[in-house]
Every structure is written in C-alpha cells, then in structure tokens.
Image (spheres, grey):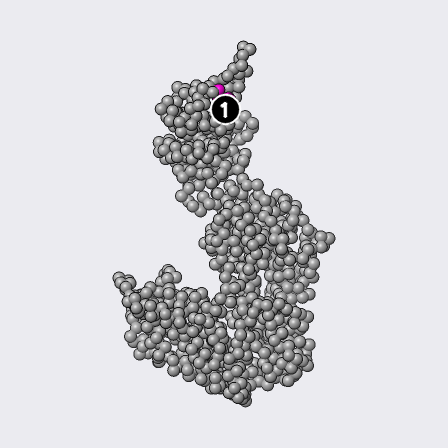
Amino acid sequence: MSNNYFNTLPLREQLEQLAKCRFMHMNEFTEGVEALKGKKMVIIGCGAQGLNQGLNLRDSGLDVSYTLRQSAITEKRQSFKNASENGFTVGTYEELIPSADIVLNLTPDKQHSPVVAAVMPLMKQGACLSYSHGFNIVEEGMKVREDLTVIMVAPKCPGSEVRAEYVRGFGVPTLIAVHEDNDPQGHGLALAKAYAVGTGGHKAGVLMSSFIAEVKSDLMGEQTILCGMLQTGSLLCFDKMIEKGMDAGYASKLIQYGWETITEALKYGGVTNMLDRLSNPAKIKAFDLSEELKVIMRPLYNKHQDDIINGTFSATMMADWANDDVNLLGWRAATGETAFEKTPAGDMEISEQEYFDHGILMVAMVKAGVELAFETMTAAGIIADSAYYESLHETPLIANTIARKKLYEMNATISDTAEYGCYLYNHACLPLLADFMKGMDTDVIGRGLASDDNGVDNARLIEVNAALRDHPVEAIGATLRGHMADMKKIV
Amino acid sequence: MLQLHDLSVEFDEGFQLKHINWQIQQHQHWLITGANGAGKSALAAVLAGYGEILAGSTSRLPTTIGWVSFEAQAQLIQAELKKDDADILDVISLGTCVREIIFTNETDPVIAGELIQKFELEYLLERAFRKLSTGETRKVMLIKALSCHADLLILDEPFDGLDQASHTMLQNHLTHVVKHTPVVMVLNRFDEIPDFISHIAYMEDGQLRHQVNREDTQAFNELYQLLHLKTTHLQVPDSDTDNTRPALNPKEPLVKLSNICIKHTDMVLIENLNWCIQPNQHWQLSGPNGSGKTAILSLITGDHPQCYTNDIFVFGFQRGNGESIWQIKQHIGYVSTALQWEYRVGTSLANVIISGFYDSIGLYSKSTDQQKHIANQWLELLGMQGRGDQPFNKLSYGDQRLLLIARAMVKHPPLLILDEPCLGLDDINRQLVLALIEKVCAAKETSVIYVNHHAQDRIAGIDHYLALEKSADNA
C-alpha cells in the first residue's frame, strides 16, 4: 500500500516545498541540450505526451527510443504503432532500459507504481528517471533507488500542442523540478533544463518548482476551475436555457464554443480583459454573479484543496482505481447521457461578441472559478506563479478541448487524476448551485441583457473595475504574460 | 458605346495586338496599364484609328479625338521637320509658330486661351514649335487635345515631362473635363492614377489580360502589385549579413537521398528512390496526387518522421547523428499550401517575413534593425510598402502567399522548396509568384525545387526534372 510522501515531511519542509516556484531566465538555458547529447533517452509509454515529447527531443538532436510492455509490442497496440511508424526503435523493458541513461516515464499516473517498480531494477547505476507529473512520488510515496536521479519535466499543455508549438519554432510553458531525495550526482537540474530545451519549453518560459508544489497545485487546478467548473457550468447553463424554452441547438452551440471564446480573452488579458469584453451593465451583472458564486462555492474549493493537501483525495481516487474505477466509469457514462452532450450544436452563426453578450453567467463562472482556485491555492502556501499557471493559464486549454469534443471526450482526454477530480467536483457542485440557478434567467445566459439602456452608475462601475484589476491573480498574470511577451510581444 | 470585338491589329513595326475584346461604356474612364512593350500605347492608338486590322471588328470609334502621346508628339515634330526639308529656298525656315499649331479650325479659342494662361505659355506663342523643349511641346499637345471638343480624350502618359505645377494644374483641369468627355489614359505608374479613373485595362504581350473595376479594391490592389513587379527592376533584397548560418561545402551535394523508402502501416508510398541535388541546380518535381511529392520534400526539410530511418544527406549532415532540425532548416526556404494553413498567427506582415530568418511560424525572437530593413525591402518589392504593421491574417489569400514566398526567400537559402506555390492563386497572383521565382532562379544563389501540376507554370531556368509515379501499393 502506498505511503503519502508529503505527509511524511515535517510542516516546515511541507511549506518550503509548496512555496517552491521560480520563473527561470532565458540565459539559464545557454547550454542547450548539451547535458543530454549522446545520452540514451528511453521513453516509457507512447501516448500523446510520450510520442510528441519524443518527436521534439529527437528533432533537437537527441537519441530517443521507446520501451513498451511485451504485450503492447506483440499485439501491435496503438502505442506500438505510434512509435514504430514514426521511425523510432521500440523494445521491451529488458531490451532497452539497461542501457538507458535517462528513462522518461510518460505513462498515465495510474500506471506509475507498477511501471516504476518494473523498470527500476533494470536501470543502470547512476541513471536518471524522469516524470512529467509528481503524483507517483508525492502521493503514492514511490521510493526510488538511491543512486538514481529523479527529475520532472512537465509541459503545461496537451501533447499535441507540445509538438505543434515546437514545429512552429516555439514551445509551451514547462515546469521542471528535481526530487531532492534523489539527486546523488547533483546534476538533476542540468538534465531537467536540457530536457526542457529539447522539447522547446525554454522558449515559452520555464518554472522551476518542486514535485510537491507541482502535484498539489496541478490537482487543485484541474479538478476545480479547469474541468470541474466548466463541466458543471456547461450542464447548468444548458439546462437553464432549455427550461426557458430556448432553441436546443443554439444553447448547445453557445456553451460548446462559448467557453473557448470567452477564455481566449482571459488568456490575452486576464479576468479583467474577459470582463472588459462585456458592456458596462453586463460587466457589473457578471461581477455581481461571480461574487455570489464565490461565496457559495468557496467551501467546496477549500474542501478540494484540503483533501489534496492532506492526501484524502489521492487515497479516495486510488481506492476507486483498486475497485476497477467503478465510480469514475459510472459517472463518465452518465456524462455521455446528459442533455447537453446529446444535443448537437446548431448551425446558426454566433459572432465572437455574442458569446460574451449572451454568456454573462458563463463569464461569471469562469471568473469565480479562476479567482477561487487561485485564492485557495495561495492560501495553502502555493506560490502565486504556480497558482496562476494551474488556474487561469490552463483554463483556455480545457475550454478548447470542450469546443472540439464536448464533455465526454474532454473527460476521456484529460489525465485520470483530472477526470476523477472533475467527477468529485461536479457531484458536489451541481446540488450546491441548485438554488442559485433558480434565480437565473435568459438575460444572463442565452439572450443577453435588454439593450435599451446601457446606463450604469459611475461609482459602481469604478468600484467593479477597481476590484477586477486589484485581484492578485491579475498582478501575477500581468507579470508572467509579460515574460512570455518578451519573446512573443512581436507576435 | 465604343467596342472592340476580337480585334487583332498590326502596326508598322510588326507589333501586333491580339484578340482584343473591350467595351467602353458611357461615363467610364479607363486607364490602360502594363509593363513596357505590353501594347498599352498601341491599344490607345487603335482607338485613334491607327493600325491595320487583321481580324475582328470595331464599332462606334470616336470621330473627334484629343490625343496626347509620344507618338502623336513625334508625328507633329516630324511633320515640322519635313516642312523644313521641303524648303528649297536657301533660307532658314523658322517653321510653324506655336500660335498656328494651337489655333486651328478644330480648336475652341476660348478654352485654348484659358489653358495657355494656365500653362503660362503666352510668351512662347510666337516661337517656332520645333524650337520648344520636350515639356513645352507636351503642353502644346495637351492644349490642342483639350480644346477640340473631342468625343474621346486619349492621354498617353500625359504627365511625362511636366513640371510639378503643370502636373497639378492638368489634374485639376481634367476633373472638370471628365464630366462631359470620356477619357482613356495610358500610365506606367499606378501612383499617378487620377481619382476619376473608373476602370483599368491591363496589357501584356499585346493582349488585354485583365479588366478591373476600380471599386473592386482587392482586384485593384493585386493589379497594382503585378504591375509593380513587372515594371520595377526587380532586385532580390539584401541578405542578413549578421546571419550565423555555416557555409556549405560547394563540392558536396545539397541533398542526397539514397534508396528512400517511405512506408505506412499497410502501404509503401515511395520505394528505392535516389535523388541528388547539386548546388545551383534547379529542379521541377512532378507526379500525380498521392505519388509522394510532399512526403519526399518533408524528408529533406526534416518534417517527416521517417527521415530518421532513411539514408539522407542534407547540407553536410547525415541525418540521425545528433543534428537538430533547426540546423537543417536554416538552409531551406519553404512554401506550400499546408504552410499557409498552418501560418495562422496574429502577426504583422513585416514579422511574417522576418520569421523566415528563424524558420518559425510567428516570431519569437527579437529581430534586428537589419532584418527589419530587409523586410521593408521585400514589402516594397511586393508592392506592399508601408503596410508592414498590418495583420497577416486579414490579407487576401494571394497576398498571404506572396508574403510566405518572401519569407522563404528572405534568408537567401541555398535551397528553396516551392511546393505548388501557385495553387489556389488567381491569374494575377500566379503571374506575380512566377515572376518572383524566376528572379530567384536567375540570381544563382539558390537552388530551386519547384513542384507543380500546371504545365503552363513552367519556370525559365529550371532544367532538371524528377517525375514520380504512383506506386502500385498506393493505386
């Protein structure tokens, strides 16, 4: 049975690890991929992250091959095809792990324990084991052999985007960390940096973090604002529009593409810009709704963060894993049966601005979710930079997934930890917002405010604008987007 | 109104206008434009009744014409010289004076008097016409043409040789004239085009290639660019002298593909292909859809994953030995329709061109002043000067393609790959693109691989051919 690593640490170290996060300067990457040149990199797993990171690393001049379980090779499973059709050497653990200088574990979290247990004895003395998520180390308490270096390189984007941005000559923001208990040669950071360069991440910005900060913030972000809030909001908003007699095709389209459109504004200019896209009366309305939502949902966000910090969340999830995912799969099937999921988007035109004007409640939900997640994370000791990436920064990515695939496929695409967290959140949040939703009408979702009067009270507007701009997620957001802008300003 | 129907006309020098179909409706004012020798002035002369009709017909040609052109000017001067020759007396003929030249039976003396004042020609009235300067004779021609109550005014490069004041005066005067008289103007330079011009006729090789209504802004802009490319002495802009691209060994081939096989799960796309590209060779690659043209090119550019499983030597690297794709791409300029699809970034025209220095889609590095300067040179070359800050994604498809071609050429790459560069382009833009490519081929710095289906898009300078066949597995 697993032993939560975080919970074994004294409070002093817990706090220190949680607060680890530093935006690295471009000139820290002048060595390029040198530390990995000529080293044998073996990737375990060839899903979206595994394949796309491998393609990038190889195109950066590194020696990459894939190792899969014997059964995946014999049965020519998709992972085998992914690797071999792209011209990579594919072999079993026994064939490739012993000669590997660095083993990249890019399998789903759920498989980490058995996979690491299987490869560790095969790894050569002094080699490096790399993760792209710290769950196995932090939540499952995996103990890695003392001679091995353990690092994490986590691109903060889906695998397809990791590849697409690299091909464009850019990269995606990436988080790196060294597991301090496993850095016997003191070169963990050099390897992690070279790896980030190999995937192109250094061009988009690299955060130096810790395994613990990564896990505790990543879990929080994905299950609350990213997946949980968007899923819950989709279902509630759709049902409200249908209840009020609106066209189902329109309602479906407004939601499916609405999240993406409004969070695009979020990506460029934070919550402030997202709200600025609304008319003054609509902005005040969205602000008021979000304040109300924050009061109602704050206990839920606190509970999620508490459960993540103290390990309750991972223990619950691992229990479901052990129980053949009964809870999760049942819920996933139910998602597929919801009215929103079953109603195809209509073919009417919805202009970019209309998504804002008719989606005031959706804007309010995104604002409330982003701010709550950020506030809760920072209150738990996670540093603002990290909290920003795990909340605001990633929301447009999930919104984009919903636009392409709606909810069922979104859940199937995201990581298993994210989906389980989304399930918990959705279960709790739907009833939590039931009363609130009774008061909602099509002026805030579906039709927009009546446009005959755009007048607002000056004092109130000034107050709202100030409150928006003063929120701490906006300050750190402006700084971090500014770092990106150093390289991207001209774009 | 005036109509030329499938008209072919021959002129003294053997120059022919071919198959001209043209109508000038009432209240239209046309500009005839085109490169030198395209037949602009000849078309104007046809309206004045010149040339020997070989085929086709005209109807309702004007009876009274006010015609200003070098040809008309030359005729008048020739006639004056003849008079001199004809003088058998042993006295020096002064020739006809300006007053006599201007005031003939056709001339409206009131209008002529006004214009003489406006052009400030009073002091020349008694002088011999043939003693005048070029600019002065031009003014005399203009006065004659504008005061004869013409049915049609043909103004062939009317502003040539005029000083700025006269130029402005003439433009102002014309704005009144066009209210009652149709004008056909011949101009080499678009930037002199007066506001009243409503239609543009574009001539090339004695043919009327394009007719554009000025209100069609997009067609107008494209025509502008085409004319710009055709009439400017095209010079490929400078290279970036600060670039860090390593020099290639001139004795080695640029590309050597040996026994290439490209396989997918259940089919073989390419088998046992060998291809060697030496410096300064220009190649045309052709083959039916699905024959693997793009796949082969992406082996060269490093975009195909199977470039690591094949025997590929490019720019001094045997692939798969620790080189990065950026070390390969720095030697290649690349354009394809797929690139245009992928190039959906909200960036400016100038930055799209500069991104060619970095082989990136979008610009993620700080550009140097020199790079910005070169980008401006390219914009000027494409007839887009001053538009560097405009957003790329708001451009027409053809303009985007032109910019991507500039992006591909901006670093003066040893190898330029043009994968169906004209696909989806209209006629004007296709000619633009081809003109640009020919310039590059002629410059001898770059080897070109040109992929296309259209035989008529053959490019001067290409002398090597590789034709692919559809593999049996793939049929």
Compared to residue A158, the image places residue B136 above or below, namely above
Residue lying furthest left in this view? Answer: A452
Q: Is residue A394 left or right of residue A44?
A: left
> Considering only vertical position in the picture, is B285 above or below B168?
below
Inspect the image, locate mark 1, and give the three-letter code of the amino acid beneath it: Leu
Can residue A250 be spotted in the picture? no
Residue A145, position as x, y percentages in the image? 63, 84
Residue A394: where, in percent of width, then height? 47, 71
Q: What x and y, as percent, mark residue B390?
A: 47, 53
Regarding residue A192, the answer to whether it shows in the image is yes
Crowding around mark 1 (Cα neighbors within 10 Å: few <14, some 14 to 19, many 20+) is some
Q: Quadrant of the C terminus of chain B?
A: bottom right
Q: What predominant SS class does the magenta segment belong to?
A: helix
Q: Residue furthest front?
A: B123
From the viewer's perspective, is A410 left or right of A362? right
| Residue ID for mark 1 | B132
Residue in view at x 43 percent, y 70 percent: A474
Is residue B308 shown in magenta?
no
| Residue B131 belongs to the span the image colors magenta | yes
Q: Is residue A389 left or right of residue A87?
A: left
Rendered residue at 68%/79% (across/down) = A98
Task: Give the residues in magenta.
Answer: B128-132
Q: Nearer the viewer, residue B87 or A327?
A: B87
Q: Residue at x 51, y 67 (%)?
A: A483
